Amino acid sequence: MLIKNLLKVSAFIITFLATTNTFADQATAMKIGCAGCHQMAVKTVGPAIKDIAKKHNGANIDDLVKLVKSGKNADQLTWGTIPMPPSPAPEADVKKVISWMLQQ
Ligand code: HEC
């Protein structure tokens, strides 16, 4: 009985932690400005996060971090006609957000 309850409590804690982590990553996306151009499901200035996840499914995250840190100029565009400015955010934050984006 005690073990069963303990299992229930740990399952709850794990779910809670997993959810808070997702919120934290989403909050980072807002904080470092990605959310200004990337919405979850619709293309705005930049492609939708779900479309990015589809296109880069299984991609090397470090390559994408480098790309976002250096930005995309007009001659490198693959989604449309709007360039992405280089991100001034710390690399660790960018990495956290991209890992989260690719799971959407
Ligand atoms: C000023 C608007 C803007 C901001 C801010 C912005 N992006 Fe983008 N992002 C874009 C645009 C526009 C594209 C599409 C560029 C293209 O056509 O290749 C893009 C593309 C991307 C891609 C896909 C790259 C590819 O080549 O397929 C990723 C990943 C990405 N952004 C992540 C981020 C992250 C993470 C942040 C926050 C640090 C961020 N973006 C902030 C506008 C923005």
Image (spheres, rainbow, N blue to C red):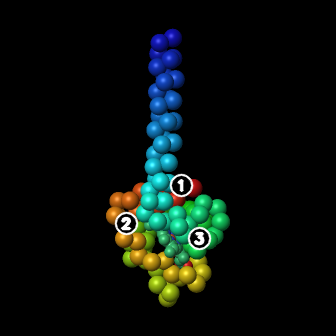
Measure the C-alpha gap from mark 2 to mark 1.
21 Å
Q: Which amino acid lies under the numbered mark 3 shown in the image of this protein?
A: Pro
Disc 2 secondary structure class: loop
28, 14: nearer the viewer: 28
Q: Earlier in the sequence, mark 3 or mark 1?
A: 3
Q: Is residue 76 above or below residue 25?
A: below
What residue appears at the point 50 percent right and 87 percent down from the top-left corner?
Answer: 74
- Residue 103 shows which numbered tag? 1
Q: Which quarter of the image is occupied by the C terminus?
A: bottom right
Q: What amino acid is labelled 1 in the image?
A: Gln
Look at discs 2 and 3 and give the one toward the viewer. Answer: 2
Tell me: is circle 2 under 8 Å from ligand 1.
yes
Cα distance in 3D space between marks 3 and 1: 15 Å
Query: Residue sitting at 40 percent across and 71 percent down?
Result: 87
Does the closest atom of ligand 1 sit within 8 Å of the Cβ of label 3? yes
Q: Distance between the Cα atoms at labels 2 and 3?
A: 19 Å
Residue shown at 56% from the left, 66% from the top: 38
Q: Is residue 56 left or right of residue 61?
A: right
Observer-side mark, 2 or 1, equals 2
Q: Earlier in the sequence, mark 2 or mark 1?
A: 2
Q: Position of residue 5 (x, y in %)?
A: 50, 17
**Labels 3, 1: front one:** 3
Name the foreground residue: 56 vs 11.
11
Q: Residues within 10 Å of mark 2 (few under 14, many from 20)?
A: some
- Decide which of 33, 16 is in the foreground and name it: 33
Element type at mark 1: loop
In the picture of the structure, the residue carrying the numbered disc 3 is 47
Residue that label 2 marks:
89
Image coords of residue 86 (percent x, y): 41, 76
Above or below: residue 20 compared with residue 82: above
